[in-house]
Image: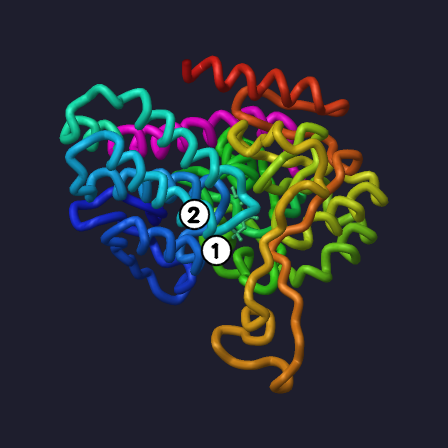
Amino acid sequence: MLKTIEWAKGGVRVLDQTQLPFKVSYVTCKDYKQTAEAIRKMKIRGAPAIGVAAAFGMAQAASKSKAGKYEQLSKEVDKAAALLRSTRPTAVNLAWGLQRMRRALESYRDRRIPKLKELMVEEALRIQKEDIQVNESIGSLGAELLRDGDRVLTHCNTGALATAGHGTALGVVKSAVKSGKKLKVWVDETRPYLQGARLTTVELKEARIPHTLITDSTAAALMARREVDVVVVGADRITALGDVANKIGTYGLAVLAFEHRIPFYVAAPVSTIDLQLEKGEDIPIEERPADEVLNIQGRPIAPKGTKALHWAFDVTPHRFISAIVTELGVVRAPYREGLRDLAEKRSNSFL
Ligand code: MRU
């Protein structure tokens, strides 16, 4: 399988996902500014993957610094963190990756500078490695919720390409198939970036899982015809109440699933839980350039001068969610206590 991101000799090597599926090309980000740009331009995307990319950016800032003293190095790393944080505001995994790197830096403050730089790179690589393990756990817990023969609908891309490996919602599908369940997947194309059409299909093809691509607006009709048994999606941020920000269109799917009494599951690592925010309305929603809606693969699809609104994410209120699957357990309503326990468990495991 294609590797999303790697720490390489000349810099951070990123698979350019804007070119898929037609071209497999890699870009090497030589410093943290280029890594930030790769995130902003969505060469690398998906909440957990950009968390890893941000951590790599911090490691680059530290290892490229010419500072002779901790205080100076720390200042430079903070400057890098501010730029990396500004790239994509909704996915909290990005801020989580930055915070973890910042804490690591503090804990190494008494080390000699060359050693400290090495330790920062090691921490970033640890974050990447852990993400794969986390996703495999999400996969096996989530797989139990799917039944043999299920027709699963998914949105956006939540697979290996959106993470360090395996994936979250798509990881659940992969794990269920690996455990012997026969599934069919409805893949939402996911306008306007087409992560479903361009990326999820590639992963499902590679995993030999039967799938059919649909336009986003087909989901309602499919549900009405009883052709969908379960919906599984990822998340970019989960609030204390259990409200979930995810790719634009997710909210509509959740309301539809509720109306048709179809289970609606969210699969995400505990690092996606943001207990600082109470409810969905508090989540910052990224607005991307209108051009991305007005053009498909560089070709205009509307008259010159047409306005377009491009929110990259929407918020699904917790009442539409049947369960949230994390690496440390499956939480059902009422979410507040369960999510708090999981976040606590996770932070204890890093003490
Ligand atoms: O804009 P993207 O492609 O970064 O959006 C990705 C999603 O919305 C995913 O569902 C989410 O990040 C979870 S990925 C495991």
**Quadrant location of the C terminus?**
top left
Cβ–Cβ under 8 Å for marks 2 and 1: yes
Corner quadrant of residue 55: top left
Residue matched to label 2? 161
Gap in angstroms between the C-alphas marked 2 and 1: 7 Å
**Tag 1: amino acid:** Leu
**Is any atom of residue 187 visible in this view?**
no
Answer left or right for 296 relative to 131.
right
Residue matched to label 1? 199
Residue lying at 54% horizontally and 27% vertically, measured from the top left: 270
Residue lying at 47% horizontally and 34% vertically, measured from the top left: 96
Residue 145 shown in magenta = yes
Q: Secondary structure at mark 1?
A: helix
Q: Main secondary structure of the magenta part?
A: helix
Corner quadrant of residue 110: top left
Give above or below for 105 relative to 78.
above
**Is any atom of residue 32 visible in this view?**
yes
Answer left or right for 254 relative to 343.
right
Residue lying at 44% horizontally and 15% vertically, measured from the top left: 349
Residue 159 shown in magenta = no
Residue lying at 28% horizontally and 44% vertically, measured from the top left: 6
**Tag 2: amino acid:** Leu
Closest to the observer, 236 or 351: 351
Give above or below for 71 relative to 43.
above
View extreme (right): residue: 259
What is the magenta range?
121-150
Q: Secondary structure at mark 2?
A: helix
Closest to the observer, 206 or 35: 35
Corner quadrant of residue 236: top right
